[in-house]
Image: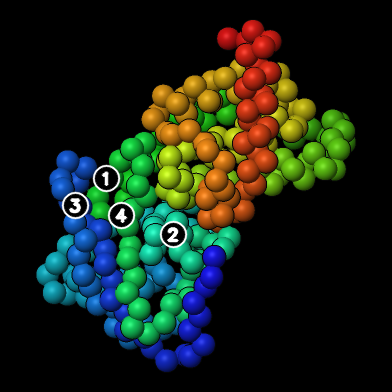
Amino acid sequence: MATQTNGSKKPMNLKLLVWRQKNGMSKGAMTTYEAKNVSPDMSFLEMLDVVNEDIIKSGGEPIAFEHDCREGICGSCGLMINGVAHGPDEGTTVCQLHMRSFKDGDTVVIEPWRARAFPVIKDLVVDRSAFDRIISAGGYISVNTGQAPDGNAIPIAKQSSEDAMDSAACIGCGACVAQCKNASAALFTSAKIAHLRLLPQGDPERAERALRMVAQMDEEGFGSCSNEGECEAVCPKEIGMVNISLMNREYERALISGKK
């Protein structure tokens, strides 16, 4: 994805087209706002904070959007920005996106995630509890918790541990679903299956995990994967589609083994 860069430190003026929707039962619409004197060093969410301050001063209802850590860790801040999940910068969440990626006079279109499984709650906020239910369906291991075991008690190949950590980097933001034309959750679900499958601690529930999590994913109403790569392209943690291949193999293996 190409990134427009504002090399100047001068404040910018932007036109915002923001999706406003009172609640999940209301009909939404795009609303125009002016973002004035925006510093290129602001984060995208800081810019929205300033816009909301102006809206409140004029007696209006501020734009509702999700955020928490603002450090690219929690996965809360999911927005479609000019049709791209999390905006134009690669490997970046909305809270890590800075306004220097835009130019003075730009029109910026801001929308919520668009997926049947992510119903709109208000404005830019969507209900992503479907992800929680997928994890609850099988994203666990049965080893005892408590005192940490010795680090060398279970030998793990270096490549396996690195691959597992790469998969575990998924923050569950939902960008993969929002960008996919099918609203597929295959990348998210496969990352959760893969990071446990690649470690010996996850082996006892290996078959059940694949069956239950895939079944829950389908039950939530997510679409099917057509291997076009939009999910990988917008993932802020750059989770690879190789996880989807592993998930498919695990699912087929579980079916063949007769696990229920």
Q: Which residue is label 3 attached to?
A: 28
Q: Position of residue 144 (x, y in %)?
A: 69, 23
Q: Earlier in the sequence, mark 2 or mark 3?
A: 3
Q: Earlier in the sequence, mark 4 or mark 3?
A: 3
- The type of residue carrying mark 2 is Val
Q: For residue 187, which quarter of the picture?
A: top right
Q: Nearer the viewer, residue 230 or 100?
A: 230
Q: For residue 64, which quarter of the picture?
A: bottom left
Under tag 1, what secondary structure?
Answer: strand
- The type of residue carrying mark 4 is Leu
Q: CA distance from mark 4 to mark 2?
A: 14 Å
Q: Earlier in the sequence, mark 4 or mark 2?
A: 2
Select label 4 or label 2 by which is in front.
2
Q: CA distance from mark 2 to mark 1?
A: 20 Å
Q: Which residue is label 4 attached to?
A: 124
Please indicate whether residue 152 sits to the left or right of residue 199 in the image.
right
Can you see residue 141?
no
Residue drawn at x 72%, y 40% is: 164
Q: Nearer the viewer, residue 75 or 69?
A: 75
Does 233 sit above or below residue 117? below
Alpha-carbon neighbours of circle 3 within 10 Å: few (<14), some, or many (≥20)?
A: some
Alpha-carbon neighbours of circle 2 within 10 Å: few (<14), some, or many (≥20)?
A: many
- The type of residue carrying mark 3 is Gly
Q: Which residue is label 2 attached to?
A: 84
Q: CA distance from mark 4 to mark 3?
A: 10 Å
Q: Which residue is label 1 attached to?
A: 121
Select label 2 or label 1 by which is in front.
2
